Amino acid sequence: MVYVKRGYPRLVVDLNKLYHNIEVAKNKCAETGAEIAGVIKGCTGLVPCARQFERAGVKYLASSRIEQLARLKENGFSTPLLMVRIPMLSETEDIVRYCDCSLNSEMAVLNALNEQAGLQNKIHKVILMADCGDLREGWWDKGEMVRDALRVEEQLANLHLEGVGFNVGCYGSVMATPDKLEELIHVAEDIEGAIGRELEIISGGATGSFMRVMDGDLPERINMLRIGEGILLAYDLPVLYGYDSGDLYRDVFTLRAEVIEVKDKPSHPVGKIGYDAFGHQIRYEDRGIRRRALLGLGKCDYGDPAELLPRMQGLQILGASSDHTILDIQDVVRRGIEIRVGDILEFDLKYATIVYLTNSDNVEVVYI
Ligand SMILES: *Cc1c(COP(=O)(O)O)cnc(C)c1O
């Protein structure tokens, strides 16, 4: 028998709220003529989450991880699957087997995909990525990109050049301004000039480009956005950039964690101070004796404790080790609220904490 952990910590996923967010994003994009690739890597491709994207009718289901896309195929999904990380040469066979389309930036990989598609008797679609300044994936030299696009078009018979795309924001923090998107359209038009036909897709980025949709100034030829965070969490645009996304739920995911100890203790460690469990030197503030609580989960489950957002007012996260999270609850107690061993505390999450929690075997995922 395989042991499956139950109870807490527990990640609660509200599928109706998720579906609502997908619908809102999809409809807003549709107003400006853009379709959506629903990017599910932020929740590790959880199948019930992916199902909401399929139900809402997105153009592609997308992930950076082949294993997540393969799982969807094995679960009978019919939405076309898009690989958004440039494929490794070593995974081209599976990319062709499981994905309908992939984002690409290397001729060596495109040649291998073409060969695999031939062997598997398929036509694999490709979107070529331009680097317009964010400095992650994509051709920097646009002349070379046009020449390579022409080679895909004319020489790689088992590939279909579906379009071009770019990514901004993820590494270089470059924003998807209208002129950045126009740069991408120029690249697309140069390629169209070379191959003598129109491209089907110009994929204008990720959640960051959704602000163009909100502002109503997404350039007309951008007809696809690849959106993950903006649907799963809807944090970046309202919180970082001040957009009003009042109709998007920001609490699709809730962490529920169990209190395993409650005691009054000094707030400064007692003894000669060296390094913490992760080899860091930490400065501890001395606030006298305060009530503390421990939760039965730690950095292994969610990464950085600063990215857990307590729903209970006055509750402060002091730190964490691999399997423990340490809370200061003095201000909660002062407000007359008791926290006892066995109590369950709730937290809002950020993108990274959702990624980690959905990867942890220690966390039960519960759908409501
Ligand atoms: C992760 C990723 C996305 C989705 O990004 P979000 O910010 O979650 O919307 C889109 N495109 C590529 C290439 C990605 O790697």
Image: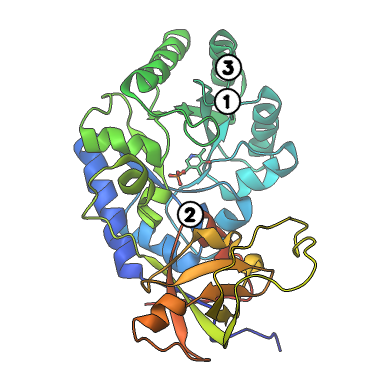
Which of disc 3 and disc 2 is earlier in sequence? Answer: 3
Q: Does dot 1 land on a helix, a strand or a loop? A: loop
Q: Looking at the picture, how far across and down is residue 75, in whole percent?
A: 52, 66
* Residue that numbered label 3 is attached to: 140
Mark closer to the observer (2, 3):
2
**Residue 41 x, y percent position in the rendering:** 52, 53
Q: Amino acid at mark 2?
A: Tyr
Q: Which residue is mark 1?
A: 135
Q: Earlier in the sequence, mark 1 or mark 2?
A: 1
Residue 57 against residue 330 in the figure, above or below: above
Neighbours of disc 2 within 10 Å: few (<14), some (14-19), many (20+): some
The colour style of the image is rainbow
Viewer-nearest residue: 160 or 284: 284
Q: Pointer 1 and pointer 2: residues touching (CB < 8 Å)?
A: no
Residue position marked by numbered label 2 in the rendering: 351
Q: Are marks 2 and 3 in contact (CB under 8 Å)?
A: no
Q: Nearer the viewer, residue 344 or 130?
A: 344
Label 2 beta carbon within 8 A of ligand 1: yes
Write down the quadrant of residue 367 in the picture: bottom left
Q: Residue at x 29, y 60 (%)?
A: 249
The quarter in which the N terminus is drawn is bottom right
Q: Amino acid at mark 3?
A: Trp
Looking at the picture, how far across and down is residue 27, in whole percent? Answer: 22, 47
Residue at image location 34% in from the left, 48% down from the top: 239
